[in-house]
Amino acid sequence: MSFRKDFVWGGATASYQVEGAAYEDGKGLNIWDVFCKDGGHTYENHTGDVACDQYHRYKEDVALMKEMGLGAYRFSLSWARILPEGTGKVNPKGLAYYDNLINALLDKGIEPYITLYHWDLPYELHKRGGWLNPESPKWFYEYAKVVAEHFSDRVTNFFTLNEPQCTVGLGYQTGEHAPGLRVGAADYFRIWHNVLMAHGRAAEALREFSVRDVKIGMAPCGALYMPATDAPEDIEAARKATFGLMNPTIGDCSWDVALCCDPVYLGQYPEDILTQFGQFFPKVTPEEMALISRPLDFYGQNIYNAVTVKADENGNPVRVKRRAGFPQTAMSWPVTPECLYWAPKFLYERYRKPFFVTENGMASHDWIGLDGKVHDSSRVDFMHRYLRELRRAAEDGVDVRGYFAWSVMDNFEWAYGYSERFGMVYVDYETQERTLKDSAYFYRDVIAVNGENL
Ligand code: GBH
C-alpha cells in the first residue's frame, strides 16, 4: 500500500502573500495593508503591495503549476477584494479576478481549493472591532454566502480559516501580526470564541448557498508532539502532549491543538482549558457549540515540525532536548520529518476525518546559481524525508487524502517580509521573474509516480 490512487498533490499560497494589487480595481483595505504601512512591524518595512503580482500574472503562475504537475492549488480569497467594506457592496472586479484564476486552473486540470480567510480581515471591519465584535461571525457568514453563490458551480473544496491560532495569538495577543494588538484575557477568549463561531457560520453558508455538494474543512496549526521512542508509554505521552494543555498561559495556549479543534470536531472546549481559564471565558451556549461543531468533511492541518517528548515515571510528557547541531531551516525551525507520521496519526485517531496536510515546507536562503538554476537541495531532502513519513502514516491506516506543499512560490512571509523564501519556485521581486527550483522538479517527479519513488 502507498498513497491512494486519487491522492491530491497540491501546493498552497495565500492572497496577501502573493497577489499584490493592493489598491487596484476597487479592492478595500485589509488589516495587513494598514499594518505594513505603519512601519516597524515587518522586515525592512516590506509590504504585500506588489508581492508576487499574481493578480496580474496568474496565467503564468498557473502554467508553472501545470509544469510541476500539481493536481490542486490551495489559495485564499481576499475578503476585501470581494467585499471592500467587509459587508454590503460586492466588488464585481474582485469576483472577476477569482473567476479568471479558477477558470485558468480548471482549464489546466488543477483543482482549486479555496481558503476563505488567511488573516487579511477587511480594515472596515477592524474599525468596528474586528473579531472582538460579536457581529463578526455574521459578517463572515455574509462573505461565505457570496463565495458559495458565486464559485460553488466550479469549486468543490473549501477551507474556512487558515490557522485561527495565528489570527488570535499573533494578531491579538503578541501583536506580531496584524492588527498588532495585545488584548487582555477576557477579550482574548472572546475573540477565540467569535472566530470559531465565524468558522461555523461560514460552514453553514457554504452548505446552504452552494449550488452543489461541497466539501468543507479547516486549516489550523498548533504545537505538535512525537515520541522519543516506540515504547508505548512514550507514544502515549506524545499523544497526551498533542491534546493536552502544554502551554498554560494566555496567548501561548493558542498553540494547544485541542483549544481550537476539540470545539470544532468534538463539540466541546477541553476540560483542562476550562479549568485553567474558565473565569475568562465568555458564556458559551449549547446553540453556539452546535454551530461551532457543525459536521465537516475533512480534517486539515498545517504541519511544519514537532517537539519530541518521552514519558516520565507518571506517564506525563517531558520534552527531550535536541542534540547540538540539530538540523534546522532558515527560520531556525527544526527539521523533524517524523511529525508527518505522528501528527496525522494522532489527529486522525482523535477527530476521525479524511486527512489533508494543508501546508508543509521550509524556508531556505536560495539564490540563482551561476548556471541559472536554483539548487535548493535542502528543500529537496526535506520534502523527500517528510513525504516518506506521510506515506508511512497512510500505510498505517490514516486516511490521508492529500498534501499541499507550502509554498508554490516564494512570497511575502508576514513579519519576515521577503527575507524568507518558502517556494518551490524562485521569485525575483525586482523583475517578477520566476525560476523553478530543483524542489519543483523533484516534486514533479514525485507527483508523476504518485510517491512511488520516495
Ligand atoms: C504558516 O504559518 C502560514 O499559514 C503561512 O501563511 C506561512 O507563510 C507559512 O506557514 C510559513 O511560515 O510550535 O507552538 O511555537 C505557520 C506559522 C509558525 C504557526 C510557528 C505556529 C508556532 C507554534 N507557524 N508556530 S509552536
Image: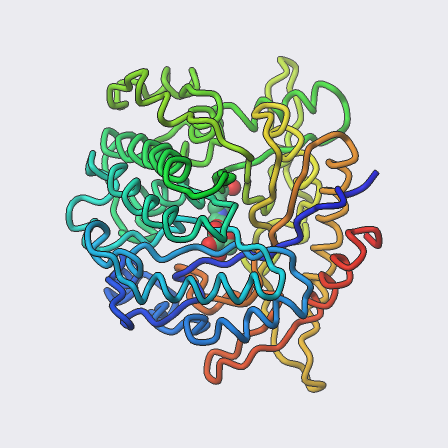
Residue 81, compared with residue 394, is above or below; it is below
**Residue in the image at 53% along x and 67% along y:** 104
Quadrant (top left, top right, bottom left, bottom right) of the N terminus: top right
What is the tally of numbered marks visible in this picture?
0
Left or right of 400 in this view: 75? left
Residue placed most toward the observer, 177 or 15: 15
Residue placed most toward the observer, 148 or 320: 148
Residue 191, x across and y down, in percent: 28, 35
Residue 377, compared with residue 219, is above or below; it is below
Say which quarter of the image contains residue 36.
bottom left
Residue 206, x across and y down, in percent: 40, 40
Question: Which residue reaches farthest left?
Answer: 128
Residue 219, x across and y down, in percent: 49, 42
Residue 348, compared with residue 120, is above or below; it is above
Say which quarter of the image contains residue 167.
top left
Left or right of 99 in this view: 72? right
**How is the protein colored in the picture?**
rainbow
Say which quarter of the image contains residue 313.
top right
Residue 19, x across and y down, in percent: 41, 67
**Residue in the image at 60% along x and 59% along y:** 110
Residue placed most toward the observer, 163 or 382: 163
**Residue in the image at 26% along x and 62% along y:** 91
**Residue in the image at 66% along x and 41% along y:** 401
